[in-house]
Amino acid sequence: MPNITVDLPQNSYAIAIAPDSLKDLGDQMKQLNIGNKVLVISNPEIFGHYGKTCLESLSAAGFETCTHLIPAGEEYKNLQSIQQVYDTAFANRLERSSTFVALGGGVIGDMTGFCAATWLRGVNFVQVPTSLLAIVDASVGGKTGVNHPQGKNLIGAFYQPKLVAIDPTLLKTLPPREFRAGIAEVIKYGVIWDEDLFTKLEHCDRLDSLEHISDELLEIMITRSCQAKAEVVGKDEKEAGLRAILNYGHTIGHAVESLTHYKQFVHGEAVAIGMVAAGKISVEMGLWTKEEAQRQDALIAKAGLPTEIPSELAIDDILETIKSDKKVKAGKVRFILPLAIGKVTITARATSEIISKALSL
Amino acid sequence: MPNITVDLPQNSYAIAIAPDSLKDLGDQMKQLNIGNKVLVISNPEIFGHYGKTCLESLSAAGFETCTHLIPAGEEYKNLQSIQQVYDTAFANRLERSSTFVALGGGVIGDMTGFCAATWLRGVNFVQVPTSLLAIVDASVGGKTGVNHPQGKNLIGAFYQPKLVAIDPTLLKTLPPREFRAGIAEVIKYGVIWDEDLFTKLEHCDRLDSLEHISDELLEIMITRSCQAKAEVVGKDEKEAGLRAILNYGHTIGHAVESLTHYKQFVHGEAVAIGMVAAGKISVEMGLWTKEEAQRQDALIAKAGLPTEIPSELAIDDILETIKSDKKVKAGKVRFILPLAIGKVTITARATSEIISKALSL
């Protein structure tokens, strides 16, 4: 599998994709011109699977390692967990030239990145994503952060990794539900950027678990998704404009996650619901054809992902919640809406009335 | 007084210096192409003096304002205070295009900058420094942060303001002790960068309070210090090399602050002690003449600043504390040491033995 470069004005970096490459992590990091100390941050389950291979690879390459584990789950994605990482970093005398390695999914990656951005005003950061969602989305692009009691990822920083080291074989231990959540983001890239990827996913008989997906299609899903993300981030690192399209499905998705207290859905499932909702709004506004929206919804359903906002959530509560979204500008909620498979627009013209009507359908 | 530009690869900005300019802050900020909402962060005493002028100026220019006050003092410079600012930012629906204004000294500036760097992954930031130390040092250059229970400024980010708006008339309400603390940093620029500034300070009869300093000398002190800082930061924004010279006097200074639990000395006083100590080390290593070191020490004493490490502090404790300094690289403590008035070097060759000997003199 190929290397992809995220090309930025400052701090460009590689996404290295290769099966069975975790054992080479130390050698890969040796190329980065970084200091000798490495703090590996993970959660207990993932560390149980891959911690030994990771630490041995780092030690063999001459790095001095230490470890910090954070319990799995969105409910630990907060400043209290960050403070404990700082304590570990202090106890182990981590230096500015040291490196924080995120060995885990999106939550571990986001938190490790935030710690790396803010410990000693910035140390090196390497992403080793272990979930499909983190591989195709969270690990690339430098968005880091934790949740505020009132909202997801409200606290954070843009901070780019020095390397994203992807080993697709790590997906073998990923629970099927988490795998499907990652497929939601792959479908997203199809809708917003890559019609051909979308069509290839349509041609696959089953998308709901890894065992039904060929190595070839998995490679296409990973490389094309990372390529899409690298292209968008390379054009707009700090989300001044274009990058917002990566939030397709996320505005309503975040609201659904928040209103269900991050308990009913994993992130990718909420995004799946959000994409279906955004599709409805786009159709309601006359921007997208009903036929293409149905193709999207069918693909999401084929991946075993939810498509409906839970009936117990009131539309007014969703409207209220999205108004506190990070992407709000001058009080206006901006939506990413499809114009065609592979093409979206960013608009602030989706009024509460339109959203209400579309979501009631 | 002139404008100075901090010239950076990205995010260059102006240091605007003008007496009685606080009332024009709204107009100055209007030029920045920022959103409508402004959160002013200050402490109760400073806000009592200048809050009204600040808020009225912002309102007159059409900004919608809100305020967050943090009790004065280094002991509130922590993540708990930051979390409360986040709560205010959330409650007031601050957006990515909104602006956090720091109206205060170094502590308020550092904390406001850190909040601006990390709320919604970065909002706009404006510095309105009200202490001499913040004017000549802390407000320029983008170093933001808070203290970790184990050390000063261990948590932070590099995050540049969009504007530093300096109104020297605000210094009238500054307590004399705080004024002298600022003079310590002005003397620092003389030693590390600007021999002519150093000489001008030597020619002044008294340096220990604002009333003995002419408007002309005050202007020179502010502009030359800001100029020096802007030049150094422009060459090395992220402290890869040169910028470390700005930490002259800070390595031992931070240790003294930390070991006296931030209670005995204000920052500038600790830096004064640190500069005298660094001078001794430089002389001990044969890098600097005893005569010039004495000129430095005399100037520091003339400003009414302390020059001696408190006798109750053990040198071994100081050595242990500086090893956990942010500036430690591969376990080696790097010192900034004068070679001549206006010229310093960065060296890791000051051994514990040399430091012990120099500090015992």
Image: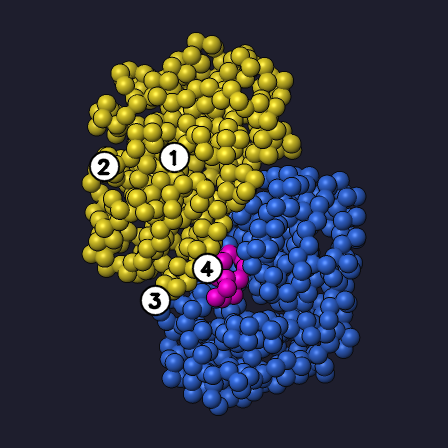
Chain colours: A yellow, B blue
Residues rendered magenta in the picture: B144-156
Residue flagged by tag 4: what amino acid is it?
Leu
**Which residue in the structure is indicated by mark 4?**
A120
Are callouts 4 and 2 both on one chain?
A: yes
Label 1, label 4: how far apart the Cα atoms are: 27 Å
Quadrant including the N terminus of chain B: bottom right
Label 3 sits on a secondary structure element that is: loop
Identify the mark nearer the N-term, 2 or 1. Answer: 1
Q: Which chain carries label 4?
A: A
User: Which labelled disc corresponds to residue B330?
Assistant: 3
At numbered mark 2, what does the secondary structure look like: helix, strand or loop? Answer: helix
What residue did someone put label 1 on?
A: A137
- Real-space Cα separation, disc 2 to disc 1, in angstroms: 17 Å
Instruction: Residue A336: tell me if it is visible.
Output: yes
Residue at 50% in and 28% down: A256
Residue A13: image quadrant is top left
Q: Distance between the residues labelled 1 and 3?
A: 34 Å
Quarter of the figure with residue B349: bottom left
Front-lying residue, B115 or B259: B259
Cα–Cα gap, marks 2 and 3: 35 Å
